[in-house]
Amino acid sequence: MSPEEILSIENLVKHFPLGGGLFSKPRAWVKAVDGVSFQVRKGEAFGLVGESGCGKTTLGQMIIRLIDPTSGSIRFQGKEIGSLSRQEMHPFRRKLQIIFQDPYSSLNPRMKVEAIVTEPLQAQGGMDRARRRRAAAEIIQKVGLREIDLLKYPHEFSGGQRQRIGIARALCVRPELIVADEPVSALDVSIQAQVINLLDDLKEDFDLSYVFISHDIGVVEHICDRIAVMYLGRIVEAAPASKLTLASRHPYTQALLAAVPKPDPHNRVRPFAMEGDVPNPIDPPAGCAFHPRCPHALGVCREKRPTGVTVDADHQVACWLNEGRGLESAV
Amino acid sequence: MSRSLLEIQDLTVDFHTPEGVGRAVDHVSFSLEKGETLGLVGESGCGKSITSLSILGLVPSPPGEITGRVLFEGRDLLKTHREEIRAVRGQDISMIFQEPMTSLNPVLTIGRQVAEPLVVHKHMSMEEARKEALQWLEHVKIPAAARRLDDYPHQLSGGMRQRVMIAMAMVCRPKLLIADEPTTALDVTIQSQILSLMLKLKEELGMSVLLITHDLGVVAQMARRVVVMYAGQVVEEASVTDLFDNPLHPYTQGLLRSIPGAGGKPAVGKKRLNEIPGTVPPITESIRGCTFAPRCARSFGACREKTPHLLTVGSGHRVRCRLFEKTSGGELK
């Protein structure tokens, strides 16, 4: 692992049991995350894109150990944290923080903003109340709210402001890596832009690295340096942001990009209709999980799972067409 | 203006709440021609959904208080008796909602739900209606529709449920379809399936569509004309090309500039997104002058004093902004 890497995920797997009870075996397993590997460099914003059920949230929650991986490795600053116990994990909690999607359900309505923002500091210990209060006052201004707002309750704020409180809570302990799980999805367009700009600024000010999870490829392209596209628990393509949007090689990435309605009435395309739904992760299709919806599927796609191919040094794609470099960008 | 299928005049909806009277919709007027798709755009709380609900008399009153006129084929629906409105709903005007999970009845099979409008409005027997329902389910591309007829909503995915909703809305071949954020709860690839289905059905049936959405991309792709709402008021109305090429209202301009580049554009030298400072005011707050002035970078003294009028500035282009009001010299500022 090179020194500039802050996070390195190797073959990470999470299978959830389905059914079964105390004495019986589970009926089936949901393969939420099924062998994912990637690295995040220091100071980088790494984007994870995919549709609902692709496993991106599960992956994000494993990174900060909110849920335990089934197997695989999570190395943070060179140290394996995937198998640490609760207590062993404690010193790392300060460095790894998360911002949640829903600014309404992720703040305790009975706590004042000051208590919300300083709770991580309290959990870390070693700071008296006065110092925590000063830290909160400083951080709340960094996220664009006022010191007086610390005395209010969450219901007194709008969605965008609540998201700022959630960001302040994550920032308070001066983390090094933030997992941002759909941080702007619940917000209106004009407010979304405010929060994206704020996250951009804070990244510089606090020397942060992000794992940025979103279903919105436009948002991810704007904020991230590199992007990985997930489908049914696996990464199907990973590349620098501009390369992924301009020269994608995986049919699924291309379909995702084509499906975004362009805000340009002169460029009207018949909405691109990729057939079918995302398959059930309990019983994913054999071979490449995307083959039932793929317009270019070959015989081999139905039988064998594609391995990752490196197109360029920084561009990987898991697709049989690319083994022979068959699929050109832009369908 | 007898050509219009739907004409809304001075529609105002007040809600009486413990915090005071909130004006959710403030003197909204617009019209919808036959066969036209009109986009109604705005952020949460701008009154777009309440506007659409009041067309069909679905705003509970009290606490709501509705004034103005909603003319559908020349008849004022606000003055029409409840029973007669029921005959219009689902037959001449139907509606699809954002949440396919909550807007289908969980204890009825989808076959029954799609057939019901036919039984009610076309007086078909349940058997005939089910046959036609099956055709519609096939038409909206529900796979293995014949087997699905006896499924319950929870057995379907989100995209499939939205297809069922569309089938339900279409069975009586309505003249007007009101689609309130029809794809917001769906993934992008499913969204594009649903949008292309809506386009196809619109062409087949020649119906008009009132498309309510916050997504400017969806509007650019689907609508012919666009009405932009802010804080209960129409702030701009224009053809879709005019609106995107030459947005006049500072709010519309801000909205368009705050969209992050959705693919296709090179991401060299990432710029900051244009943001509109501040937040939408709560509806119970009464604002003197222009409702957008507190967030507007170009506001000046007069903006805070009097509510600007909706001015016609070009063919079919209306804007509610003081910047375009004629000065005493007769020139545009």
Image (cartoon, rainbow, N blue to C red):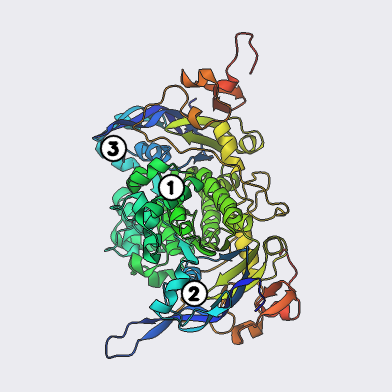
Please identify, in this view, whether the residue under mark 1 or under mark 2 is nearer the observer.
1
Which residue is painted at 29% across and 90% down in the image?
A24
Q: Which mark is residue B84?
A: 3
From the viewer's perspective, tell me whether residue A315 is left or right of residue B295. right
Q: CA distance from mark 1 to mark 2?
A: 48 Å
Whether residues under marks 3 and 2 lie with C-beta atoms below 8 angstroms apart, the answer is no
Q: Nearer the viewer, residue B6 or B24?
A: B24
Q: Amino acid at mark 3?
A: Glu
Q: CA distance from mark 3 to mark 2?
A: 45 Å
Q: Secondary structure at mark 3?
A: helix
Q: Amino acid at mark 1?
A: Ala
Q: Residue B279: x, y in percent? A: 46, 39
Q: Are marks 1 and 3 on the same chain?
A: no
Q: Residue furthest top?
A: B328
Above or below, comparing residue B50 to residue B315 in the picture? below
Please identify, in this view, whether the residue under mark 3 or under mark 2 is nearer the observer.
2
Disc 2: which residue: A279
